[in-house]
Amino acid sequence: AQTVTQSQPEMSVQEAETVTLSCTYDTSENNYYLFWYKQPPSRQMILVIRQEAYKQQNATENRFSVNFQKAAKSFSLKISDSQLGDTAMYFCAFMKDTDKLIFGTGTRLQVFP
Amino acid sequence: DVKVTQSSRYLVKRTGEKVFLECVQDMDHENMFWYRQDPGLGLRLIYFSYDVKMKEKGDIPEGYSVSREKKERFSLILESASTNQTSMYLCASSFDRYTDTQYFGPGTRLTVL
């Protein structure tokens, strides 16, 4: 069975600094999708970034980028120039062609001024 | 923009009551999902549906049932609420079954006394 592990329950970063959230997963599949979702306090969960496993190039979305290491089964999220609005719970998630999203336990990120 | 709405933001019920949680999406998505979110456990899939009147069990279906009479509406039913069903419940929808991003509602925080 596929599993997703986020080993950092909480992290903090100062505004304008860079922070990296880690995620590892376990699968025997070759084709799959990886996601980072953001859940701000008392607000809706939204997609931050997604990565197709067959693409070698790391996905980027403005200040958010991933480091996808397929052989190591690692999918970390880097947030550059952190802003107060980045304070949120971040979930890493895995999907293969069974279409079920499997979530990690989340990392709570606090951005300090 | 995709909009997924849930009928209640907060709900308090008593043990043994029948509870209905409603979810509506406005983007003609085929797929709809119900998750529960608990601290330290991430999100876990309860039920999902790929079409009207279709439903499939997720990872933790016990104690729950669902109904999808119309494409845009997906209901989660707790036949006889118990205290261990106190949780945050998130609804999501997606267009493509196998690869697409899921869009989440704001969540319903259910407390069972």
Image (cartoon, grey):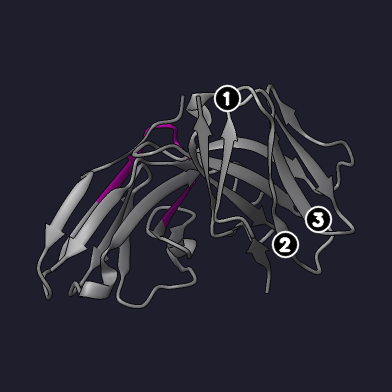
Q: In this view, does A8 lie above or below A59?
A: below
Q: Quadrant of residue A50?
A: top right
Task: Give the amino acid type for the residue marked by disc 1 in the picture.
Answer: Glu
Q: Give the range drawn in magenta.
A: B22-34
Do the residues under discs 3 and 1 have CB atoms within 8 angstroms?
Answer: no
**Residue at 80% from the left image edge and 64% from the top image edge:** A29
**Residue at 44% from the left image edge and 54% from the top image edge:** B33
Disc marking residue B46: none
Tag nearer the camera, 1 or 2: 1
Secondary structure mainly formed by the magenta segment: strand
Cα distance between the residues tagged 1 and 2: 29 Å
Cα distance between the residues tagged 3 and 1: 36 Å
**Crowd tier of the residue under label 2, counting other residues whose Cα lies within 10 Å: few below 14, some 14–19, many 20 or above:** many
Instruction: Say which residue label 1 marks.
Output: A15
Out of A113 and A91, give the one closest to the viewer: A113
Q: Is mark 1 on a helix, strand or loop?
A: loop
Q: How far across and how far down the image is residue B37, in percent?
A: 40, 58
Give the quarter of the figure containing the C terminus of chain B: bottom left
Task: Give the amino acid type for the residue marked by disc 3 in the picture.
Answer: Asn
Do the residues under discs 1 and 2 have CB atoms within 8 angstroms?
Answer: no
Instruction: Say which residue label 3 marks.
Output: A31
Cα distance between the residues tagged 3 and 2: 13 Å
Q: What element carries label 3?
A: loop
Q: Mark 3 lies on which chain?
A: A
**Crowd tier of the residue under label 1, counting other residues whose Cα lies within 10 Å: few below 14, some 14–19, many 20 or above:** some
Q: What element carries label 2?
A: strand
Instruction: Say which residue label 2 marks.
Output: A25
Q: Mark 1 lies on which chain?
A: A
Residue B49 shown left or right of residue A12 in the figure: left
Residue A91 shown left or right of residue B40 in the figure: right
N-terminal of the pair, mark 1 or mark 2, is 1
